[in-house]
Amino acid sequence: HQEQQPGIEAEMTPAPVYDNDDPGLGRLQGKVAIITGGDSGIGRAVAVQFAKEGADVAIAYLDENLDAAETAEAMRKYNKEALLIAADVSKESECKLIVEETINRFGKIDIVVNNAAVQYEQKSVEDISADQLEHTFKVNIFAHFHLCKYALPHLKPGSVIINTASITAYRGNPSLIDYSSTKGAIVAFTRSLSQAVADRGIRVNAVAPGPVWTPLIPASFDAEKVAKFGKDTTLKRPAQPIEIAPCYVFLASKESAFITGQVLHPNGGTVVNT
Ligand code: NAD
């Protein structure tokens, strides 16, 4: 499923790829994960790969979005039945609900993936209304605080939190000033929280993708921007969601046991100041 703007040719916006033929290695066997925005794009690929690795997955999604059922269908290939939770993460009460419903169904939480986000193009700060600014911050960064706040009491030693930043946190983006600001906040949030919960045996890391083909992109870019998308990376192309999801599997598994407070940069080789 992908929304396309008029004038954007289909071949310029290839369908997102969420899975591959690699076998699961059981790296998340017996684990329970929450993924916000797990219905679409990167979140959907993470949900499918987590299921392949043996995890049970709760997917929080916006209720007007019909993609959650498609994600659940993709997870059934790995004999996993997704818990679909319609919730607006911009609201603290709904972040609490996501945690409660996951505990009611699976009895525990081992992995929290903060992934839901919105982005709106703008020419400069004069273009950003107070309402838009508030909404972007509520979805993109406040939700990270609220979900962690309600999940943390349930997280046992060995649990992990994975946040979703962006290359824009490092390079900036003149058309996404509010969005890139929230992503910078996520990097600092990740470092600070990792230090705050280390003595509980909980690790906190983030993923900062470069350009990725997801429904977020053609929905907010004009045809010219879509054509240039990813061409400034070393690999000269954008990623597919399936190329980002393994970072989340790695950070969720015990293979990354000595990594916390860090940001992984799947960005096609773009040089960023970290
Ligand atoms: P996407 O639009 O496919 O996914 C975003 C998800 O967030 C959707 O599932 C949407 O339903 C959900 N969402 C939005 N508002 C919500 C709300 N109020 N409550 C609950 N869910 C809500 O986009 P994507 O590209 O897969 O983005 C996933 C993450 O990756 C985001 O954090 C995004 O900022 C980040 N990212 C994407 C790119 C890229 O190039 N696509 C690059 C860097 C970072």
Image: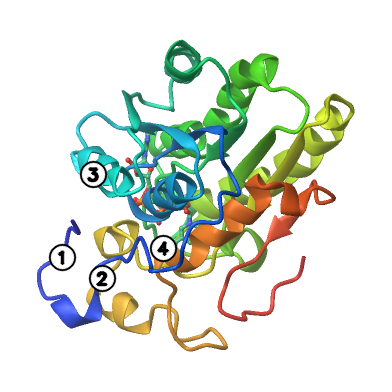
Quarter location, residue 19: bottom left
Disc number at residue 241? 4
Sequence-first disc among 3 and 1? 1
Residue 256, percent from left and from top: 75, 52
Q: Name the mark nearer the viewer: 3 or 2.
A: 3
Q: Nearer the viewer, residue 140 or 98?
A: 98
Residue drawn at x 58%, y 32% as measured from the top left: 144
Dot 1: few (<14), some (14–19), or many (≥20) neighbours within 10 Å? few
Sequence-first disc among 1 and 4? 1
Q: CA distance from mark 3 to mark 1?
A: 27 Å
Sequence-first disc among 3 and 2? 3
Disc number at residue 73? 3
Quarter location, residue 186: top right
Disc 4 marks a residue whose amino acid type is Pro
Determine which residue is flagged by label 2. Answer: 222
Judge left or right: residue 216 versus residue 134.
Answer: left
Judge left or right: residue 234 versus residue 6.
Answer: right
Sequence-first disc among 1 and 2? 1
Disc number at residue 113? none
Instruction: Label 1: state its secondary structure.
Output: loop
**Whether label 1 touches label 2, CB < 8 Å:** yes
Disc 1 marks a residue whose amino acid type is Gln
Disc 2 marks a residue whose amino acid type is Asp
Dot 4: few (<14), some (14–19), or many (≥20) neighbours within 10 Å? many
Asked if the beta carbon under badge 4 is closer than 8 A to the nearest atom of ligand 1, the reply is yes
Q: CA distance from mark 2 to mark 4?
A: 21 Å
Residue 206, percent from left and from top: 66, 50
Residue drawn at x 55%, y 60% as measured from the top left: 246
Colouring: rainbow
Disc number at residue 5? 1
Dot 2: few (<14), some (14–19), or many (≥20) neighbours within 10 Å? some
Disc 3 marks a residue whose amino acid type is Glu
